[in-house]
Image (tube, rainbow, N blue to C red):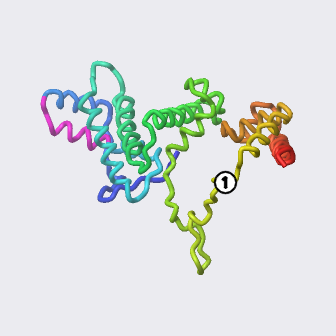
Amino acid sequence: MYNKKVSIPGINTNDLKTLTNDEMIKLFKAYHQGDQTAKDKLVEGNLKLVLSILKRFKTTEENINDMFQIGCIGLIKAIDNFDLTLNVCFSTYAVFLIKGEILRAFRDATPIRVSRGTKDIAYKILSYKEKYYNNYGIEPSNSEIAKALGIEEYFISYALTSLKEPLSIYQPIYNDGGDTIYLLDQIADHKDEYDKETLISLRKALKNLKERERNIIYSRYIIGKTQTELSQELNISQAQVSRIEKTALENIKRLVK
């Protein structure tokens, strides 16, 4: 979660007003009777709600104003569709619409097209992790997430990766005053690195590992689990997981040669 103070150009966020529940009810009744100034007051009185939701997202100085305006669109939709007779707190209802608008903007803004289904699952994973942490004070394991959302464990890492911003291959990564080293310079060409015989040897090596070694290698490099997660699942220390993983990799190297 991104808790940095949100600053909106041209708006003093410290001066924003908040409405009491009684004021909200009175304004909603006036708005439903056709008073447009009541709607304006409802928007102004709930801008802090939009800001509080924006704090959950990692925004840049370049897009914070856009994200705020998008959040306000969600707020206006909430005001237009809110039903006083349901006896639901407005903020509870509005959070879903505001957050939904912002998430949709982030999802559609990425320069690389990832399937909407994959991104939707990624946001469900983040939402589940946040709720789980708020309830229990710890991060859920991948197996718990997979079971709760009805997905395969290996798909969790793939889905979350879809939310990361892509880097340009011309991104400078080092400069000591001389020639700049770009990301492109560090990308290896593996096209001819692995032949069929090597892949067959690798499969045989994996089969010859001890069951625990094989499971840890699979969990670490296929599913994407951390050593901490594995230590909790196997009821052993992280140092033990690290040693087993290191031994397994050394055995693979030895068997492949």
Indicate the quadrant where residue 229 lies: top right
Q: Position of residue 210 (x, y in %)?
A: 86, 33
Answer left or right for 29 relative to 1.
left
Query: At numbered mark 1, what does the secondary structure look like: helix, strand or loop?
Result: loop
Q: Position of residue 22 (x, y in %)?
A: 29, 30
Q: Which residue is mark 1?
A: 192
Q: Position of residue 168 (x, y in %)?
A: 49, 60
Residue interval drawn in magenta:
34-46
Comparing 193 with 7, the one in front is 193
Instruction: Tell me if residue 55 can be seen.
Output: yes
Name the residue rendered at 34%, 48% in the picture.
68
- Left/right placement of residue 34 relative to residue 42 reads left
Q: State the predominant SS element of the stretch in magenta.
A: helix
Give residue 74's quadrant in the image. Answer: top left
Q: Is residue 239 visible?
A: no
User: Quick one: label 1, few (<14), some, or many (20+) residues within 10 Å?
Assistant: few
109 sits left or right of 212 in the view? left
Quarter holding residue 42: top left
Residue at 84% x, 41% y is: 244
Q: Residue at x 73, y 43 (%)?
A: 199
Residue drawn at x 71%, y 40% as measured from the top left = 220
Give 180 or 122, whichever is nearer the viewer.
180
Magenta-colored stretch includes residue 35: yes
User: Outermost residue, bottom direction?
Assistant: 178
Report whether 234 appears left or right of 192: right
The residue lying toward the viewer, choosing from 31 and 246, is: 246
The amino acid beneath tag 1 is Asp
Q: Position of residue 110 (x, y in %)?
A: 42, 48
